Image: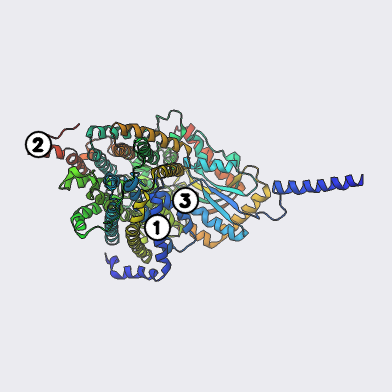
Amino acid sequence: MELFSMDIYLEGLKYFSNPMMFLFSGFGVLIGIIFGSLPGLTATMTIAVFISFTFGIDATLSFAFLLGLYTGAVYGGSVAAILINIPGTPNAIATGLDGYPLCQKGKAGQAIGIATVSSAIGGILSVFVLAIAAPMVASVALKFSAQEYVGITLIGLSIIAIISTGSMLKGLIGGLLGLVIGVIGMDPITNFPRFLFGQPELIEGVSSIPVMIGLYGISEMLMQISEEEHGVVIDQAVKDIIPSFSDIKRLLPTITRSSIIGVIIGAIPAAGGSIAALVAYGQEKRFSKHPELLGTGIIDGIAAPEAANNASTGGALMPMLTLGIPGDPMTAVLMGGLIMQGLRPGPLLFKQQMPFVSSIFLSLLLSVIFMLVFGLFGAKYFARLITVKKQYLIPSIMIFCLVGSYAINNSTFDIWILLISGLIGFFLRKVGFSPAPIVLGLILGPIFESNLRRALILADGQWSTFVTRPISLFFLILTLILLFGPFIWNLIKGDKSTDII
Amino acid sequence: MRRNLSKSLLVAALMVVLVLSVSGVSFAEYPDRDVRVIIPWSVGGMTDVLTRPITNWLEDYYGEAFVVENKPGGGGVVGSMLIENAKNDGYTIGTTSMSTVSAKYVSPMYPEMENVELIAQVITIPATVTVNADSPWQTIEEYIEYAKNNPEEIKNSNSGTGASAHIYAAAFENEAGIELNHVPYPGYAEAITALVGGHVDSTNIPLPDVAPQVEAGNLRMLAIAADERHPDFPNVPTLKEKGINLSIGNYSGFVAPKGTPKERIEILENGIKKAMEDPEIRNFLVKAGFQPIYKNAKEFQVTVDEAEARLDYLVNELGVELIDD
């Protein structure tokens, strides 16, 4: 651990005598927020688009910019989730659960304020964990094999029961629907094509982003069009953007807990921010003093996922920097950027390029600060955006949804997926289903399936492998608590009011 | 009569000018404007990383922009077909790898190597036999002996059933006379992580991807499937030295649409040769883990033919079903 003396961080500080570092970082955050908030333009895509601009410039400068994009895009996704109930990126699915209802109450400013501050705290915390404990956390993440992924995706899936507002049964049906859609495409282990219906585009499965934008975006717009009153614009009280000290103090345990969840899940390769945010939200439901209010638009429900998904940024960088293994698709693209600069991410980076590595820590910290500043200053304007008349707002959002879906794979097929899932989403909403469980099922299903089967290959077909491995067993127990805890709790208390339907 | 003659002369002259300008025939030396370089894989991917420094060098050399466009999708099928269908005037070129060849076993629509002109190969990437540093096998002989005595027991991670690392493993099994337990992962990174974490026993993933972990002492490379030893790992034997006749792995090189004028191909072939002779480019490629190797169009053809024959054998004789990486 002699690696982590103060001098090493000071070495990275020298790069910041160049004012361009600040300019690049700030610019990156700004672009990131804008791209992240547009439905369909995911953080991964934002980085992939802009990474080619950085090839000519110095490595530290280019990473100040790219990390700015990364932080900004992850945060920007939540702005869209809060304002128009369309998660800009999958990371923001959980944010919309309480963010949008709060916005409907005319408190968009407050919602964005809480999201910004929680994101910033989560982000800063993850930078510190990254700087101090990266090699340690990364080596823990290595212990995760297919069996443990099964456990962690099960936790994610069990959250479906928790986040379904209204009827739990409908939530579970929705989750199942998502799982079924996730089965379409090539079998992950044997490559047997499933349910292609002669469409070669389905070989790689139904891509989840157009489904997500369709179920959330298009169906929401259709709902609004079909409503009787058209001219209604919810007045937005653009005050209380900067959260009060007492709010932050009250939310601090939530934010800390969620940040830790975010860092750890972010560090596990292939898990990523969307699962982190969901697990944090689920935990909030467990620890909250008034869990019944979650989903109705309370700030706790925004703080938890936001702290977690921004904390996952630092988490995802750990295995990338220390092991050369990207923690999520975004860091996979960032890793390409590092290699392009002639730097080799992996175990030797910390030994050979420590000044550069410490400049990464500082750049990440800087970008979180920029995010905080832009977020709090911008909240006013963001909130005003949705007071635009619906006849202008709805078509513009529709266009963004279309462009975003097309842009993911430059595929017109994805536009069909978007429109079909939009229509399905519209009818499902009419009968009281919410989109979150479907999207969750679709995103987590394939991860669950491939790891379940991989785990069984590794264990020679022994199902006992899931309980004989301690970390896996821990996750399974946690899943059971999450699923049956509330029922058992109510049974003990003698409360018979809990009804599954 | 005279008026008519001068008139027809004028018309003829006009025609010539028109035809020349429309057909884009130019008397200036090729290239005299931007050259599009289509990479059928994503930004930051293997082919992207090795191609950009070379095209940057070519830009300086020719004084014309080489505009790199990444067209990922369908495991390289989308971009490769764009290259095939591009105008064959030398102003659109692209890159190719073994995935372009394997696509026909995978995708309903696929590119054909006979629809492009090869320009030059720039790197080769040998497959390896790599184990965890804590593994009991110190040499390739020990590994093979164990595998022969315990068929289908060694867990070998690959990048997906039928994907490249599985192809290497199947060829290795066949040549070495062993049987492995194949564990498919979504990609190289996940398959290597599983090996570093000790969840599987070995992998055949190519050298550049395992090299950082080998250098860091987390993994041990028992052998490489190349014709000669790698300059960075002089102590690692080749499989051929050990009597296993297997040289397999990926490669990357430049191609142009079919019918691109021969002299333009030669101009590029030459430029790429000069780029590959630049020590700076060489060092970059070696540092990124590749084995730089310049092969002209003719030699490149041999590489491609070998890859086609190998895949054909695996699919039609061994019954391996291929997929994209």
Say which quarter of the image contains residue A352.
Answer: bottom left
Query: What kind of colouring is applied to the model shown?
Result: rainbow
Left or right, A414 with reference to B255 = left
Subunit ID for the residue under disc 3: B
**Residue A222 in picture, x, y percent from top left:** 37, 36
Q: Amino acid at mark 3?
A: Val
What mark, if any, has residue B43 been given in the picture? 3
**In whole angstroms, how far apart are the C-alphas of marks 3 and 2?**
57 Å
Q: Is residue A222 left or right of residue A145?
A: right
Mark 2 or mark 1: whose residue is earlier in sequence: 1
Q: Name the residue tied to disc 2.
A: A495
Residue A446 at x, y = what percent?
Answer: 34, 38
10 Å crowding of disc 1: few (<14), some (14-19), many (20+)? many
Instruction: Work out whether residue B26 can be spotted.
Output: yes
Point 29% across, 69% down: residue: A6
Give above or below for A290 relative to A422.
Answer: below
Residue type (three-letter) at the residue carrying disc 1: Leu
Give the label, 3 or 2, closer to the camera: 2
